[in-house]
Amino acid sequence: MTWIIPTRTDYTLELGDRGIAVWSLQKQLVDDNIECVPDGVFGALTESAVRVLQRQLRLTQDGKAGPKTQSSSSRRQANVFKELPLDLLWSNCSYESSGLYSAVNWSVPGGVDVCTMQRRISSVDFDDEAVIERAFHSKYQMGLAKRTLQNRFQAYMERPGTKNKPELCWRDAVLFHNYPALSDKISWLGVTGLSTYYTSPQKWVLDHGLHFPDGTPIRTPLEWGQRYSLGASAHDEPGQAVRFVKSWSVP
């Protein structure tokens, strides 16, 4: 099948649907050892498989993969990956895509971010079936994200800006997913050593129109990073991409 990347996120996948988002769901079912054929066609077998998944997740067994079914499945899959603080990978996944297999974000020119981990597909690869399937394979992308988080954490634990500060290292490792330049700077210089570019209002940040939970506008790149994963206790901000983490130790 020649895959066409969806132009919008389909929040409910159900009987009769076709395409790469259905294939992504089917791959997840197979990865969960539930009988299914990843052919991109949501037929009776897929509907039955979704009911099995819903029974395992203790959800309403209607055979439709709505937001609750998709996100619950993604959370279970994310927490299969060990050697990370519990719910760290899921927090990142949830903030990026709400755990939706069909999630697409076309807002940045030159490509599209897709699936649960919002993997980037460059426009030059829109006709490459293998690239598209890898990007929409949730378990594969979570595995890549897990290794990146581990590698960043280990490197940051040795760098002067974050040395021997496990919570900050994990937060900074998550930040690397979306803002690698700031993440890297913090690991070497610490938050207090950042240049004025990162601590002064910048147009691209202002254009987002974001606010901390206490209503304070987010104006600087550092504040953007605090909202994403670094956190800002003064503004009641947990860091949206790590918000479900309760303990920073590794189980």
Image (cartoon, helix red, strand yellow):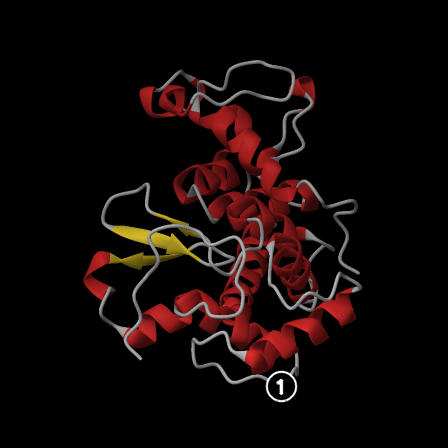
Position of residue 131 measured from the top left corner of the image (x, y, whole percent): 32, 71
Q: Nearer the viewer, residue 104 or 244?
A: 104
Residue topped by disc 1: 35
Position of residue 53 measured from the top left corner of the image (x, y, whole percent): 70, 72
Q: Amino acid at mark 1?
A: Glu
Task: Determine crowd level at label 1: few under 14, some 14-19, many 20+ residues with C-alpha closer than 10 A.
Answer: some
Q: Residue at x 51, y 85 (%)?
A: 37
Position of residue 114 measured from the top left corner of the image (x, y, whole percent): 41, 56
The quadrant holding residue 34 is bottom right
**Does dot 1 land on a helix, a strand or a loop?**
loop
Q: Nearer the viewer, residue 236 or 1?
A: 1
Q: Left or right: 240 with respect to 128? A: right
Looking at this view, name the residue that lies furthest to the left. 124
Rendered view: 245 above or below 119: above
The quadrant holding residue 63 is bottom right
Number of numbered callouts drawn:
1
